[in-house]
Amino acid sequence: MSDSPLLTGEHVSKSYGALEVVKNVSIEVAPAEFVCLVGKSGSGKTTLLALLSGMEQPTSGRVTLDDTDLTGSSENDLALIRREKVGFIFQSFHLIPTLSAWENVALPLFPLKMAHQERRSRAVALLTRMDMGRRLEHLPAALSGGEKQRVAIARALVNRPRIVFADEPTGNLDSTTGADIMDILKGLQDEAGVAMLMVTHDHELAGRADRIVRMQDGELGA
Amino acid sequence: MNLHYLVKELYHRKTRTTIAALGLAAGICLLIVINALAMAYRQAAKAPLKDFGADVIVQRSGDVPRELSGAVFPCSAVTITRAEVERIRRMPGVREMGVAVLLWVFDARRMAIVLGIEDQGNVGPAILRRYVSQGRFWEAGRPEVLVETAYARQFGIKPGDRIPLGGETYAVAGLVDASRVPKVATANIYLPLAQAQRIASASTNLRTVSPFAPSDVNLLFITADQDKTARLTSSLAALLGPKAAISTPESFLKSLGTLFALSDKFALTVSFIVIIITVLITFKSMAANVSERRSEIGILKAVGWTNRQAAMQITAESVCQCLIGAAVGLLAAFWAVEALGLVTINIPIPWEMSPSPHFLPGGGDPVFQTLRLPIRISAGLAVSAVVLGLVVGGLTAGLLARHIARIKPSEVLGYE
């Protein structure tokens, strides 16, 4: 792990009207580091994830990803940064229902000038690595929750990101499947050297991260 | 824009694609059919005149003959003087003109509707030479006539016979098939114009109702410049006075009494309403489509699609739906037009244009020209409707997509 942080949040705050959801948070994630953000529901952890990933702009403070200042960047610039450097995994999978498993994985590659076959082979390679080789042409409706999440993880990795943001990736899964997904994420971190910032309220899963950051009432705890 | 994704969306969202496409298809179909109908009725209204190659038929009505003996004018067609004919010939918009003299000739044994026509010409009853079914057309300068088939059968007349008319005897050169002759020119006996003028000018009974010189006529057939027909009609009415009877495609259209004939602007008004309704339906359907896909757009943005790329994708899908709608609408319109083409319509011939005397059996019956509705879809109409549909759909979807593509992923992906 390098000493220079990949992701930095400095004095980041976010308010919705009078309600301050994230309060003066400073955080760093190193390259290939697995950080778990834990806290009770409503503690502001998902909002912090959105702020650090550039999905939301902070009310105050500064977010830097791989030496690029996300704060104040335009929507289009943020989209391009996400395309090149960031992967996302959502609790509700957020797959496109009309696209097959491999097509969902290749979705971030669609806007790129790339041959159809290359897109497919990259997506297929990732899915095969996740034991989804036999489900390539299935639509999301025909997949189980665990399978959907594997597709979502493959999608988050297809653009070869520097960091993956995962929002409760096991939240909609049973404990066995959740543990499998965690194995996959941990393996990817180790093999591909991808940094992970994962929100979870499952302390057992969080225990497998390199570092746990606790959040309470919009502030980072000890 | 990713074609693969587009095709998948259209294929797997069959209901959404079908609803959006059908809304537009209905509008395009209606637009085409309404305009094709309007054009068909306009075309049909030209039929009574078209056979003569004329755009305008001019008559002047007069008084009823005091006595039905010898040669008389029908009260619907009295003298139009040579001077008036020459002034009309010089009117702006007149391209070509044909003249005729229509008479009723009574003698002790029978009554005959007689039409004096020019030997040559492309306008007016001169074209009747095409309808000779037996014998031949008369030779110029010889006292010969043509007799209508049914009349000839009734009185046992054959080509080569000689028949008396207006105090003279004429050789029957041939017979004319009346079923093929335009209704407004149905007569029993056709003869050279000069002969008819001579019979008319020699008739005392006729001249007491309407003075007639040997070079006068009582029917005019005019080919006019289309854009000047209305102005020409006004000029003719001004010259010939209040008793002028001027028949044009517009007057026949009005006599048809259809909605399309009520106003020249009917089709335009209905088309405008259809366009507005189609725009609203398309807008609603596109808005529903785009709104349904908010979270999908959020996913696209989250995985690195720019606003423009997301908007282009949604717009391209909508344009494809519009293309499908346009194709279906066009196809439906072709089917509808094929079906409407089987409809027969009757164009009423005004009584003043009917040459038959009302006092003869069946003479007072309404006269119609019956024809199949000449409906067809012109390439211009089809292309205009399809382009309009695509522009409406494309613009609507483009605006909506551009608006919705601005949403931030965090707004739709369910954050705390």
Image (cartoon, coloured by chain):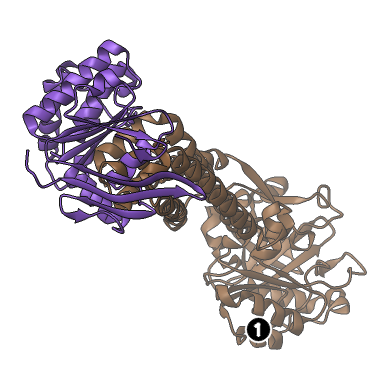
Chain colours: A purple, B brown
Residue B125 locus on image (x, y percent): 60, 65
Q: Is residue B224 visible?
A: no
- Nearer-the-camera pick, A181 or B154: A181
- Nearer-the-camera pick, B34 or B320: B320
| Residue drawn at the location 65% of the way across and 79% of the way down | B232
Q: Is residue B83 left or right of residue B365?
A: left
| Residue drawn at the location 65% of the way across and 84% of the way down | B88
Residue A210 locus on image (x, y percent): 16, 29
Split into 4 quadrants, where in the image is the C terminus of chain B?
top left
Around disc 1, counting alpha carbons within 10 Å, would you say few (fewer than 14), some (14 to 19), or many (20 or more)? many
Q: Is residue A164 left or right of residue B43?
A: left
Q: Is residue A40 visible?
A: yes
Residue A91 locus on image (x, y percent): 34, 27
- Nearer-the-camera pick, B56 or A41: A41
Q: Is residue B188 left or right of residue B294?
A: right
Q: Quadrant of residue B79?
A: bottom right
Q: Is residue A175 left or right of residue B344?
A: left
Q: Amino acid at mark 1?
A: Ile
- Nearer-the-camera pick, A101 or B253: A101
